[in-house]
Image: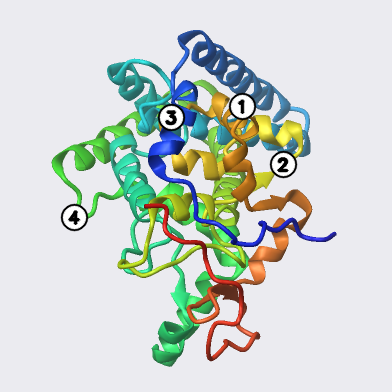
Amino acid sequence: MTETRRPPFTEPLPKMSELNKLLAPYQKSSIRHSLWQLANTLLPYFLLWYLMWLSLKVSYALTLALTVIAAGLLVRIFILFHDCGHNSFLPSTKWNKRVGFWLGVLVFTPGEQWWRSHAIHHASSGNLDKRGIGDVTMLTVDEYFESRWFGRLGYRLFRSPPIMFILGPIYMFLLSHRFPLPRYGKRETASVVWTNLAILGLGAGLSLLMGFKAYVMIQFPIIWIAGAAGIWLFYVQHQFEDSYWEREDRWDYVASALLGASYYQLPRLLQWFTGSIGFHHVHHLSPRIPNYNLEPAHENTPVIKKWTRVIRFSEGLKTTRLKLWDEPDTRMIGFTRQPSAAGQRQPKPERAS
């Protein structure tokens, strides 16, 4: 299939002031819509837990089949949790925090800690001089070849699909999120502690109800599959060949959103399970847009559609071959592709402001 590419860069990107006016109508949260999303996501998820518990007496293969659906719902729960962190899911900041905390317990993620990290990602996405928090680790060609052999080996292992998408979810959701780091503030540290206690309490309650072995046999594959899907979504929405990365003095917010975040075009059912997060370019332009307004904002804003980098579902897997950022050529390349000595591709558009 031929890749869908952006049009040639023949004009400047739109200014953020112009985009804010166009996107403002989509930034309003709807209590009715948000409550409906909580109901159509959480109720089936809890029902599936009950059915999986019953299925253990029949066949674990049946349990695992139901686990795949439950994992899809957990991905959707994570998107609702994510929207709470942007204060976009509900009109009330207080209720975004309260609902977001308990959704975070379900997805094994401390709210305040993850939300802050994710906010840093939004503020620095595509900035080569501000990498390291809330993003997928990526090296430039020069950084990779200037590293010692063990640094290159570690990077190769990290960027390999088995490590990133199979071991990665176990490390991130079961281990990494459990420990506060020295750089965390009091609120972030408290978030980690309280989330851990709530997860422990929920796990203990379910273990008393169904048995510890049954709890683990259900919970572990759900969080593993959902975690892998979540990491994949985050990866594919920023790690594509003609993405956007610039040094601090040339970095631009609008460019990082329109050129550095993709529209991952998923089948309608998968779009529902992923809370329309495939419209990632719109989300980066305006994080205050709730997930249920991302598609309308994209479809009804021609100036955004014009610059959108579409990645079709069938071509997403090709992005796993991309490992390094070639600065002169402004593109991502694989380990086996030779970097360019000087940029030969079309120039990036002018800054938005």
Q: Which amino acid does label 3 sit on?
A: Lys
Q: How far apart are marks 4 and 2 (CA)?
A: 37 Å
Q: Are marks 2 and 1 in contact (CB under 8 Å)?
A: no
Look at the numbered disc 4 and give the secondary structure of its residue.
loop
Q: Which of disc 2 and disc 4 is earlier in sequence?
A: 4
Q: Distance between the residues labelled 3 and 4?
A: 37 Å
348 left or right, relative to 151: right
Residue 63 visible: no
Give the numbered dot on residue 21: 3
Q: List the residue tagged with mark 1.
A: 296
Q: Do the residues labelled 4 and 2 touch (CB within 8 Å)?
A: no
Residue at x 57% of width, y 38% of height: 277
Look at the numbered disc 3 and give the secondary structure of its residue.
helix
Look at the numbered disc 2 and give the secondary structure of its residue.
loop
Q: List the residue tagged with mark 2.
A: 266
Outermost right residue: 1
Q: Nearer the viewer, residue 129 or 209?
A: 129
Q: Distance between the residues labelled 1 and 3?
A: 15 Å
Give the numbered dot on residue 104: none
Q: Do the residues labelled 2 and 3 touch (CB within 8 Å)?
A: no
Q: What residue type is labelled 1?
A: Pro
Residue at x 53% of width, y 91% of height: 341
Q: Which of disc 3 and disc 2 is earlier in sequence?
A: 3
Q: Which of disc 3 and disc 1 is earlier in sequence?
A: 3
In this view, 332 is above or below 273: below
Residue at x 33% of width, y 50% of height: 123
The quadrant the N terminus occupies is bottom right
Q: List the residue tagged with mark 4.
A: 183
